[in-house]
Image: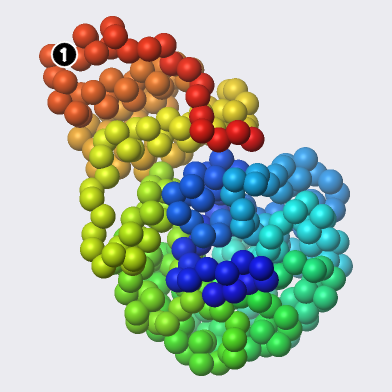
């Protein structure tokens, strides 16, 4: 799959997720093997007004490239202006969100609401693609509902309009994030386009899912969203499975705790304290999922106020799970004072 200067084979992409795919999480996922990472979506109207939160979503680190910055909005002129701002900000790819199901977004005739106006989708894509030099891509859904699936008709229109890759969340807008993703439309869309890469999004949760997605649909890449939250290891594990045709070794407790702490540190470095510390709470569930006694530990972690406390809780928990048992107090006494150390320099 080639998007501009970016070329990957059986690409593994981090899906754009509001409130999740900020700079620290993108760096972690890129380090874990994601081939392309996508930003949270940015409202074009807010960006052209120079709104600080929107500008901050454009922050890019060399550690995460290639990175796609996603934008949305109903007004072509505003989107064009936003695209130029994003291009000047150094994005490798500009992605247009035409699939968000959230009521506030669709009520403004943006996101998935665009699926009701295929001609406008094409016009919008063409106008933006002609205004910038970096590749423009689109992320959308199958259709507004099951009675109006239009993706097989929309895809060739977008390709002709200059779209360099199309990511398809294999659900309709009315499904939101419920029900099973319908991958059967991917091969249909592949036949409808000439060269434009087609990216499958929806229900890729395991290495086996990834292999099945490539084998059954012929997609050019897969995009992983919710399954990667607190589980950035998924990219590395999928790549190992695809390359070696065997399952990777199970994740160790040390891998989980070390990555959780590193991600927490990076979040504090980037977002400051206490914001970075508090906002990280949403990631604990994923990092600790399936571990014995994880619920009790999560309850402790969301009630504390300092990194030192999180460091102590997580390392005590690590030692407990690794079988120190009655030696836990001895280990605690010998442990170093927590320091904010991170491999990544922003």
Q: Residue at x 64, y 59 (%)?
A: 68
Front one among 328 and 148: 328
Is 55 situated above or below 258?
Answer: below
Please tell me which residue lies in front, 191 or 142: 191
**Residue drawn at x 67%, y 71% as measured from the top left:** 4
Residue found 20% across the figure and 29% down from its top: 321
Report x, y in % for residue 272.
62, 26
Q: Nearer the viewer, residue 274 or 88?
A: 88
- Quadrant where the C terminus sits is top right
Indicate the quadrant where residue 224 lies: bottom left
Which residue corresponds to mark 1? 327
Q: How many marks?
A: 1
Image quarter of residue 316: top left
Location of residue 111 in the rendering, given as x and y in whole percent from the top left corner:
65, 67
Q: Is residue 335 left or right of residue 199?
A: left
Does residue 186 appear in this view?
A: yes
**Horizontally, is 1 left or right of 113 in the view?**
left
Q: Where is the N terminus found, in terms of image quarters? A: bottom right
The reply, left or right, for residue 125 in relation to residue 6 is right
Q: Secondary structure at mark 1?
A: helix
């Amino acid at each position: 799959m080639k998007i501009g200067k970016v070329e990957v084979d059986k690409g593994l992409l981090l899906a754009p997720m509001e409130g999740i795919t900020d700079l620290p999480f993108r760096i972690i996922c890129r380090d874990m093997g994601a081939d392309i990472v996508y930003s949270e979506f940015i409202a074009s109207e807010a960006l052209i007004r120079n709104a600080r939160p929107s500008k901050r979503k454009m922050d890019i680190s060399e550690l995460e490239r290639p990175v796609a910055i996603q934008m949305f909005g109903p007004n072509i002129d505003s989107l064009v202006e936003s695209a130029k701002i994003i291009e000047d900000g150094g994005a490798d790819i500009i992605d247009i969100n035409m699939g968000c199901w959230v009521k506030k977004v669709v009520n403004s005739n943006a996101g998935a609401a665009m699926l009701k106006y295929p001609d406008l989708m094409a016009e919008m894509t063409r106008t933006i693609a002609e205004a910038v030099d970096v590749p423009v891509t689109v992320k959308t859904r199958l259709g507004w509902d099951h009675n109006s699936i239009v993706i097989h008709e929309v895809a060739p229109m977008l390709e002709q309009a200059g779209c360099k890759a199309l990511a398809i969340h294999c659900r309709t807008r009315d499904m939101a994030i419920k029900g099973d993703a319908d991958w059967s439309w991917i091969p249909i869309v592949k036949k409808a386009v000439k060269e434009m890469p087609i990216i499958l999004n929806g229900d890729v949760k395991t290495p086996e899912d990834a292999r099945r997605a490539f084998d059954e649909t012929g997609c050019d890449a897969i995009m992983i969203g919710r399954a990667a939250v607190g589980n950035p290891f998924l990219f590395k594990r999928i790549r190992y499975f695809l390359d070696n045709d065997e399952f990777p070794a199970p994740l160790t407790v040390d891998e989980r705790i070390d990555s959780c702490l590193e991600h927490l540190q990076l979040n504090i470095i980037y977002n400051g304290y206490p914001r970075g510390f508090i906002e990280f709470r949403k990631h604990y569930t994923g990092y600790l999922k399936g571990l014995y006694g994880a619920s009790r530990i999560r309850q402790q972690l969301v009630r504390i106020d300092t990194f030192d406390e999180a460091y102590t809780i997580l390392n005590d928990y690590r030692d407990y799970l690794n079988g120190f048992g009655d030696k836990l107090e001895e280990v605690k006494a010998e442990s170093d004072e927590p320091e904010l150390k991170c491999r990544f320099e922003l």
